[in-house]
Image (cartoon, grey):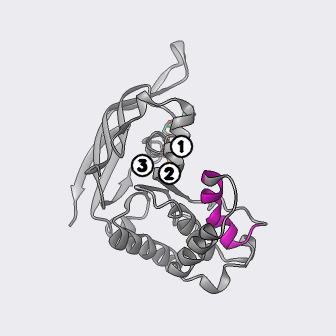
Amino acid sequence: MQEHVLHLQGIRKCYGSGDLQTEILHGIDLRLQRGEFAALIGPSGSGKSTLLNLIGLLDRPSSGKLEIDGEDIARLDDAELTRLRGQRIGFVFQHHNLIPAFTAEENVAMPMLVARGRPDRDMFETAGRLLEQVGLGERKQYLANRLSGGQQQRVAIARALAMNPALVLADEPTGNLDTHSADEVFSLMREFNRHQATTFLIVTHDPRLAARCDRIIELIDGRIASDSQLS
Ligand SMILES: Nc1ncnc2c1ncn2[C@@H]1O[C@H](COP(=O)(O)OP(=O)(O)OP(=O)(O)O)[C@@H](O)[C@H]1O
């Protein structure tokens, strides 16, 4: 097992081409150890989503080295990147991205269905267990669009954990929620982190939530401006 779930060295990202090319990330060095619970903060436009997209293997860096769970992504073709993303990374977005006409259970089973190619009993058992862990065991047969915003985000967390990923990337996971639901969703991520040693990297604009992380990484103008260990 790799000690570092994530290792970035000199990561740069440019958008556009020719004279219109703009560099957004200017050489990011970052390591995340297994079991870390880290916040990524920074002003709007500082490059947080751009960085998360690279780490989430949704886009490739313009240069630099990116390793996920010991795999150097430069060596992987697009199909291998998709496999690595599906198996090792979980995503929680601000807008939960659940399939509204599917039940909570079907939504959580979806990553397992995609990986295995056909439904089996085990994936629904796993989905049911995860939904119990996020406090929605009674509602697993509810359609996603019949659940409240906070409940939908809890389903999204269960779905992100369905493949037992090494790393969960959360982009403003509580941005749409009232304070109480935001606290609940945050506490759930924390519990999974403590009990399963899942590594979390969470983009948040909420200083109160960032202060509940172990580490705060601050991005300003495409550079890491500060990186502080809180516990
Ligand atoms: N596909 C793209 N093409 C060109 N420029 C882009 C693209 N995506 C992002 N940018 C630019 O990159 C910069 C960083 O954007 P990014 O979304 O990563 O910031 P952010 O820190 O996540 O901001 P916010 O907190 O507002 O979500 C911005 O100036 C943005 O306009």
Give the numbered dot on residue 83: 1
**Which sits earlier in the primary sequence, circle 2 or circle 3?**
3
Look at the picture and state if 138 lies above or below 118: below
Mark 2, other Cα within 10 Å: few <14 / some 14–19 / many ≥20: some
Residue picked out by circle 3 = 43
Mark 1, other Cα within 10 Å: few <14 / some 14–19 / many ≥20: few
Label 2's element?
helix
Residue at the outermost top position:
18
Label 1's element?
helix
Callout 1 amino acid? Arg
Look at the picture and state if 122 lies above or below 81: below
Callout 3 amino acid? Pro
Mark 3, other Cα within 10 Å: few <14 / some 14–19 / many ≥20: few
What is the CA distance from the residue labelled 1 to the residue labelled 2? 6 Å
Which residue appears at 39% of the width and 50% of the height?
A: 42
Give the numbered dot on residue 87: 2
Callout 2 amino acid? Gln
Residue 212 appears left or right of 136: left
Look at the picture and state if 176 lies above or below 58: below
**Which sits earlier in the primary sequence, circle 3 or circle 1?**
3
Q: Please report the bounds of the magenta region as a residue range.
A: 102-115
Which residue appears at 55% of the width and 81% of the height?
A: 132
Which residue appears at 75% of the width and 67% of the height?
A: 102
Residue 25 counted in the magenta span: no
